[in-house]
Amino acid sequence: MRPRDILVYIFLSVAWGLSFLLLLHVIAAFGWVGSVTFRCLLAGALLLGLARIMGRKLRFPASWRPLAVVGATTVAGQLIGISYATPLIGTAMAAIFVATIPLFSMVIARVWGTELITPSRVAGLALGTIGIIMLVGFPAVPVDRNFILGCVAMVFSTFCAAFGSNYASRYLSDTGPWEVTIGAFLFGGVMALPLLFLVPVPGVPHAIDYLYLLVQAGVMSALTYVLYFGLVSSIGATRAISVEFVVTVIAVLVGAFALNEPITILQFIGGAVIIAGCALVLGIFPAKDKIPLQP
């Protein structure tokens, strides 16, 4: 990785990890649907306006479908899932689920034929599965309907994130990160908009709530996703998405210590097992096996 890629990687880790502090505030003010819809539309509009002010020439792809797919998955699907789940299962629990994104990414890449699978990666997938079982099977809160729904929503969210990143790497590699981010967020916001009829804004937000939304849209979405899609183009989807390891660590610390959310020792161990499995999948640990397994 180039020095610039490393700096982007660190910034994304910190920004997305700390974004959980704003997430619950914005959801409480605008609802889980409103928080996603307004965040997406505002992020896309801010970037589009900034591009015009800077005189930046935007070159969108000839077909809108790739942007719509990324908007539906990496943006709308991921944010809807995590916004719905976090109030139900807590920040720390949701953050540990985030660490499964690289596992899904590797599986998707393998199915598409863009990644080889080796014995060490199989071991990584096995460890990741064990970690998920530890995470969900031994929670610090009662296993009720809301807990199960929250876990399902987080699995949906993480799968969408992995799918969209691989899809962008495969079909939007020639499109700039500004164009991908603007298109994906605008499409994601439009797709989430009809859900407001089912889950309306719960009340009248305060001035500080709009500030939180602006920071979340401008910094945690517009800026970070421009950098992220640029990182995907630079180092590949699977390596770029490994940033979620550090995001998970930061967000778990935020949830456990800043927000006083309950989490068991076994869940901490489960999170560590998931991260270890992802590290094997991504080849962060030196692998002795170089022979890929046949599908």
Image (spheres, rainbow, N blue to C red):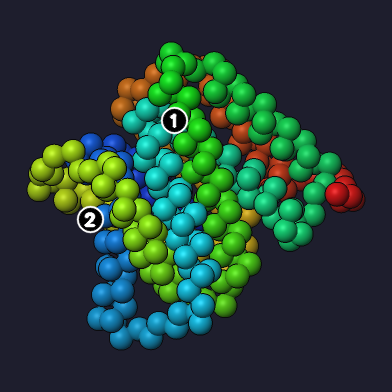
Q: Nearer the viewer, residue 272 or 130?
A: 130
Residue 11 visible at all? no
> Residue sitting at 31 percent across and 78 percent down?
51
Report the number of numbered marks. Answer: 2
Q: Quadrant of residue 88?
A: top left
Q: Secondary structure at mark 2?
A: helix
CA–CA distance between discs 1 and 2?
26 Å
Mark 1 or mark 2, earlier in chain = 1
Q: Which residue type does callout 1 highlight?
A: Gly
Drawn side of residue 148 relative to residue 133, left or right: left
- Return the mark for residue 234: none
Residue density around tag 1, few if under 14, some if 14–19, many if 20 or more, within 10 Å? many
1 and 2 marks in contact (CB < 8 Å): no
- What residue is disc 1 on? 150
Which x, y percent locates residue 145? Answer: 43, 21
Which x, y percent locates residue 15? Answer: 38, 50
Q: Nearer the viewer, residue 226 or 30?
A: 30
Residue density around tag 2, few if under 14, some if 14–19, many if 20 or more, within 10 Å? some
Q: Secondary structure at mark 1?
A: helix
Which x, y percent locates residue 176? Answer: 49, 75
Residue mark closest to the camera, 1 vs 2: 1
Which x, y percent locates residue 234? Answer: 58, 68
> Residue sitting at 50 percent across and 61 percent down?
70
Residue 86 visible at all? yes
> Residue sitting at 51 percent across and 82 percent down?
62
- What residue is disc 2 on? 214
Drawn side of residue 185 relative to residue 241, left or right: left
Q: Which residue type does callout 2 highlight?
A: Leu
**With respect to residue 160, does 276 lie above or below?**
above
